[in-house]
Image (spheres, grey):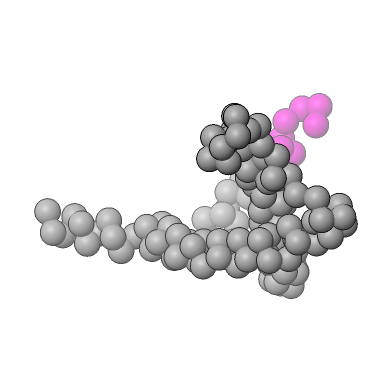
């Protein structure tokens, strides 16, 4: 059982997933700060100090009895801002990755070297193609 667990834990996919979770948690803090500390205040400034989060339906005179639907809308807006921010970062990383892969692909255009069996099979194929009538 221990050997099976070690084989499972050492697989590349499991380690990649663990690393992705740790990086994702750290990245989440950066994106949250971006949204809460930069984007939302700038949006409030552009809207003249207006905040969606303040929308509420109040029941009676008490401040505690309120249906704060503005908080829900603010969470939806935050979600779209976070999603768009992550999209932009992933797009930026994929552009860098493509630039790194392009020089490697240029070097792969070398002609394939055939071993003796493949050379013989190629010659046999060519001879058979010549012998067929109408070709």
Q: Is residue 22 visible?
A: yes
Q: Is residue 16 visible?
A: no
Compared to 73, does 51 lie above or below?
Answer: below
- Residue 54: x percent and y percent? 69, 45
- Residue 6: x percent and y percent? 22, 62
Q: Residue at x 60, y 29 (%)?
A: 60
Q: Is 30 one of the magenta-colored residues? A: no
Q: Quadrant of residue 43?
A: bottom right
Q: Is residue 85 left or right of residue 24?
A: right
Q: Residue at x 40, y 61 (%)?
A: 18
The magenta-colored residue range is 129-135
Q: Locate the C terminus and report the quarter of the image it occupies.
A: top right
Which residue ends up furthest to the front in the rendered image? 61
Which residue ends up furthest to the top in the rendered image? 134
Q: Is residue 54 left or right of residue 120?
A: right
Q: Residue at x 28, y 60 (%)?
A: 9
């Amino acid at each position: 059982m221990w050997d099976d667990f070690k084989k499972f834990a050492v697989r590349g996919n499991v380690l990649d997933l663990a690393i992705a979770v740790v990086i994702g948690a750290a990245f989440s803090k950066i994106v949250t700060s971006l949204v809460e500390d930069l984007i939302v205040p700038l949006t409030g400034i552009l809207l003249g100090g207006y905040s969606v989060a303040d929308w509420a339906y109040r029941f009676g005179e008490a401040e505690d009895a309120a249906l704060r639907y503005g908080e829900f809308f603010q969470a939806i807006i935050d979600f779209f801002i976070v999603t768009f921010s992550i999209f932009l970062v992933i797009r930026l990383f994929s552009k860098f990755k493509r630039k790194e892969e392009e020089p490697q692909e240029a070097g792969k255009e070398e002609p394939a070297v055939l071993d003796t069996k493949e050379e013989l099979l190629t010659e046999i194929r060519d001879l058979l193609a010549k012998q067929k009538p109408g070709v």
